[in-house]
Amino acid sequence: MEFSRREFLGLAAGSSAIGLASRWRRTSLWAGTRGAFREFALLDCGSACTIKESLAGYESALIGSGIPYRRISVLPASAVHDLIVPAAHLGDRSVLRQLKTCWHRGATLLFESGATFLEGGEFEVHRRVVESEFGIRLGAPRPLWGSPESRRQAPYLRYQWPASAMVRDFSRLIPVDCEGGENIAYFQELPVAAKRHAESGTLVFLGSPLGPHLLAGDREARIWFKAFCSSC
């Protein structure tokens, strides 16, 4: 069984009531961490953000964790130190080059691909520019609900860095191949996220959307994201 984008968002949001109900408690528990994180810039790509719930999920997790951030729609002329780009489908090479410049100047860049539900020509454009600017090769999007294992239990993505986390997913993923980098998450044995260093900067590339799970209050997703922020 393959889930559409609409069905995936509905499933991911199914636990959002629990997540929102516990938001005050999480904020109280993490209030003591304020000031322990550097400020992040959260980039709203507008129409190039294919899953708005992902953008909302990162914003919710930043607020809930007490992590300082500013939401931006245009990259500033000066390099941003820590930058999160949710669910981005960027066919504009110039924008990716700006992000690459920030990364090479020392930024920590979390780039979540928004091409999971794209097909045909749109996905091919995304694939080409990501490989050209980030050096990461992308496989074709594939459903998580296609293997014999998924018929017995819900699929999980296994994150290994910067913290171990098992995030239940209902959607599709994009396999990643990062020569010279480090795979940091897998579906079974298939790499779905990678980390690369360039000079003093770090790129973390996610081939499967994490943001909607953050919005739903998924505990494992939040653990991983907070660990990522702490590592910067």
Image (cartoon, rainbow, N blue to C red):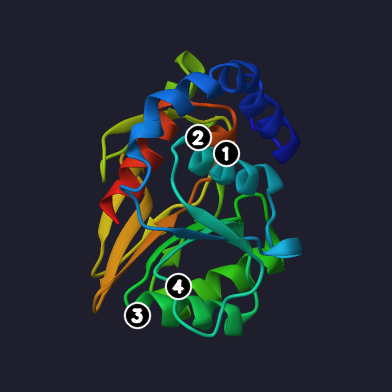
Position in image of residue 59 (x %, y %): 57, 45
Q: Is mark 4 on a helix, strand or loop?
A: loop
Q: Name the residue under label 2.
A: 64
Mark 4 or 3: the one toward you: 4
Sooner in the amino-acid sequence: mark 1 or mark 3 = 1
Q: Are marks 2 and 4 in contact (CB under 8 Å)?
A: no
Task: Work out how far the residue at label 4 is from the one at label 3, CA to CA, in angstroms.
Answer: 11 Å
- Kind of residue indicated by mark 2: Gly
Q: Mark 1 points at which residue?
A: 60
Q: Do the residues labelled 2 and 1 touch (CB within 8 Å)?
A: yes
Q: Name the residue under label 4.
A: 80
**Residue 24 shows in this picture:** yes
Sooner in the amino-acid sequence: mark 2 or mark 3 = 2
Res 57 → quadrant: top right
Q: What is the number of the mark on residue 104?
A: 3
Position in image of residue 102 (x %, y %): 42, 78
